[in-house]
Image (cartoon, coloured by chain):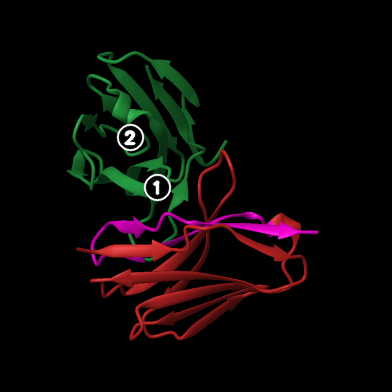
Chain colours: A green, B red
Amino acid sequence: DAGITQSPRYKITETGRQVTLMCHQTWSHSYMFWYRQDLGHGLRLIYYSAAADITDKGEVPDGYVVSRSKTENFPLTLESATRSQTSVYFCASRGRDREETQYFGPGTRLLVL
Amino acid sequence: SQKIEQNSEALNIQEGKTATLTCNYTNYSPAYLQWYRQDPGRGPVFLLLIRENEKEKRKERLKVTFDTTLKQSLFHITASQPADSATYLCALDTGGFKTIFGAGTRLFVKA
């Protein structure tokens, strides 16, 4: 199906474990983004990517790693999960023009115990 | 520092009335501003974009204004319906590749 998907939708893990959240889009959009959403903070940008093999930090990158070997995929890895990383994570994609709409995935709810 | 503020308190209105949501920002000069809708358990969905040289934009029952002097955008839903109940986010262009989002305002429309 066309669109942007995230997996898993729900994840429970323990502190210190490595977790990878997957994001896949079928539009061949150049830009992809990872946000976290916490009560009272709204959406905060973790990392973004302008194209395959081009990534850059956002507002809250510490503790996260991204890669983008293919245009359609943009995985987010928590190298050693902490309780403060409990959040809802959204992936988004957008075309080259910065006025273009960002399309968001359904989100991944992550609980770190 | 750059800051976006939306009404943190929920807005409760009666069906058929006009809902007005506010987005204020400081230390930005955005070229455009966007409004998104977010339903519980879902990702945000784009609604409208308004550019800095546009005072007002409309789409069906939605109207957005953008006052760059006041550094404020107003989002109106006319003839509101219970199905309009959701959280509404404003988002600002930062002049680069990134968009900055407000925390959102929850709207409840009572039948």
Labels 1 and 2 touching (C-beta < 8 A): yes
Few, some or many residues within 10 Å of mark 1 (<14, 14–19, 20+): many
Residue B26: % across, % down: 28, 71
Please tell me whether residue A99 belongs to the stretch shown in magenta: no
Q: Amino acid at mark 1?
A: Ser
| Distance between the alpha carbons at the discs numbered 1 and 2 | 10 Å
The quarter of the rendered structure image containing the C terminus of chain B is bottom right
B41, B93: nearer the viewer: B41
B50, A38: nearer the viewer: A38
Relative vertical location of residue A25 with respect to residue B52 in this rendering, above or below? above
A28, B19: nearer the viewer: B19
Residue numbers of the magenta segment: B84-111
Residue B106 seen in render: yes
Residue A19: % across, % down: 32, 19
Q: Chain of mark 1?
A: A
- Badge 1 marks a residue whose secondary structure is strand
Q: Which sits earlier in the primary sequence, circle 1 or circle 2? A: 2
Name the residue rendered at 33%, 58% in the picture.
Answer: B99
**Which residue in the protein does label 2 denote?**
A74
Few, some or many residues within 10 Å of mark 2 (<14, 14–19, 20+): many
Residue A98 seen in render: no
Give the quadrant of residue B108: bottom right
Residue B44: % across, % down: 51, 50
**Which residue in the protein does label 1 denote?**
A93
Residue B85: % across, % down: 66, 55
Q: Is A97 on the left or on the right of B56, as rendered?
A: left
Q: Is B32 on the left or on the right of A53, as rendered?
A: right
